[in-house]
Amino acid sequence: MNDLSPDQLESLRLSELRFRRIFETAHDGILLLNADTGRVIAANPFICDLISRPEHELVGSFLWDLGPLKQVISSRENFGELQRKRFIRYEDVPLETPNGRVVHVEFISNVYNEGNQDIIQCNIRDTTDRFETQRKLEHYVRTLVTINQCNASLVHSYSEEALGNAICKALVINGGFGAAWFGLEEDVDDRIKLKVKGSSGLALSDISETLELQHDRNEDSELRSALKSATPLWMNSNLKQRLPRLLSMLVEKQAYTSCALIPMSKKIEVAGMLVVFCQESDRFDEEILNLLVGLTNDLGFGIADIRVRAEHSINQAKLLRSFDEAIAAIAATTELRDPYTAGHQARVATLAEAIASEMGLSSDTRSAILMAGGVHDIGKIQVPAEILSKPGKLTPAQFEIIKTHPDAGFQILKNISFTHPIAEIVLQHHERLDGSGYPQQLKGDQILLEAKIISVADTVEAMSSHRPYRAGLGIEVALKEIADKRGIHYDAEAVDACLRLFNEKGYKFAPM
């Protein structure tokens, strides 16, 4: 030092001053350590504030004994690794300060030589804001993904309970929330009741059928107000005092520290609320709440849609019953003109449906066959009664009149909006595979399968039953007729199914 000129000494003094100012004013924590011993030789104000320790307590201490920093360099062995590598970097290390505050830091250490000794400089940067921002972003993305997954439940759920449970389960399993509860509002005599429609993360013993909010309960008033105004409510303090008994018991049991209570919008036809619990006090923020508000409103629209679908299903069932009753009345009217064939259409319809079932056909096809079979002779209403009930053999001219009944039936039925081609089936029920039938002489695949099945059932019932012009020929003769003309007049599969029904499964016509 004595060999230095005054200018060099001044330059050195200024350099040391600059270093001291940087050291003392830096917004990163800086520790200088003896590289051989690991003892602190200097600590800047920032690190002292960060870990709530004065400088005089830090200087002379070992790095691994500095309270919060134990999580970074926890032992002399870890310090040995730093000595060997001469550089270490850790990101997002959580440090708990003596006052209980948790901060996240980035820890960078490097070794350099100063005179005749090695110095370790540790730079500790507070990254808590960055960590919290990243964590909030992850929570937001996770919640957004969960809500997108809930869309499938909104489309595919067919009951209010199934939808409510699916949404709550998704929030807990996929969204990472502690528990979820969903109820629909019932307003009786100015008492507000929420009937549970879904939950997840709760024991069955924790779930009541209803949650009632009373006028004389202070802790209910905040929730009543939120429901009435459809305003989301977020709580992260005094949950036990602010929530109704049912929900406050859950808080006490599961140690939840925050919850969001999201009422449905007043624009939705149904009223209710989604309650989401969390064990993190800061999980709910404005962005998360907005996502949950959107989900709750979607849930409300889903419930409304389920109710509309249920009402539509009920009305459709009533309409179908009325439709069936009207068709039955028409069929009965037809048979009043022809007492000798009373019950014929019903027996043909029943046998034709049984054949279709034996063939393994769908329920829709069986329904079409049952309906068409019940009215297949409706066109006979245009045939003169004296021809229908004539006791003797029909003349060729009279038989030609009889042969008009499939087309007459088609004309009666064609303008009715059936869900199946009933009019076409009725038109074709006397067609035959080889083209020898009537009225259009259709062949093979030109004939609807339903009509082919009804023609087999019609032949068996007509031949085995009594008619004005002859006694019944018996079931054996009728079955022989369809067996002999299998694949010629009648569909082979339909014939085989009919034969199995009578010969192997004991099928019998209902008595007249």
Image (cartoon, rainbow, N blue to C red):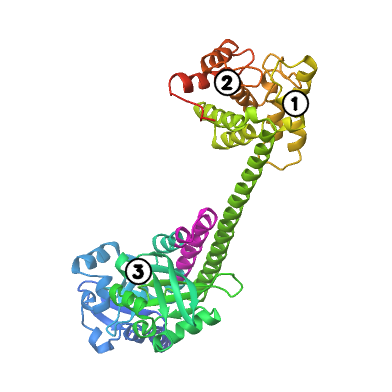
Q: Any mark on residue 460, and which?
A: 2
Amino acid residing under circle 1? Glu
Q: Nearer the viewer, residue 26 or 178?
A: 178
Quadrant placement of the N terminus: bottom left
Q: Which residue is mark 1?
A: 386
Looking at the rendered image, the disc whose residue lies closer to the viewer, 1 or 2, is: 1
Q: Nearer the viewer, residue 211 or 1?
A: 211
Cα–Cα gap, marks 3 and 2: 61 Å
Q: Position of residue 319 (x, y in %)?
A: 63, 50
Q: Which residues are magenta?
A: 136-164
Name the residue at 59% across, 60% down: 308
Q: Nearer the viewer, residue 164 or 27?
A: 164
Q: Is residue 175 left or right of residue 48?
A: right
Q: Secondary structure at mark 2?
A: helix
Amino acid residing under circle 3? Ile
- What crowding class fits label 3: few (fewer than 14 Cα within 10 Å), some (14-19), or many (20 or more)? some
Task: Indicate whether residue 10 is drawn in magenta.
Answer: no
Q: Secondary structure at mark 1?
A: helix
Q: Which residue is mark 3?
A: 207
Q: Position of residue 192 (x, y in %)?
A: 47, 79
Q: Quadrant of residue 110?
A: bottom left
Cα–Cα gap, marks 3 and 1: 74 Å
Task: Indicate whether residue 154 is drawn in magenta.
Answer: yes
Q: Counting residues from the N terminus, which is met first, the one under dot 1 or under dot 2?
A: 1
Looking at the rendered image, the disc whose residue lies closer to the viewer, 3 or 1, is: 1
Name the residue at 35% across, 76% down: 246
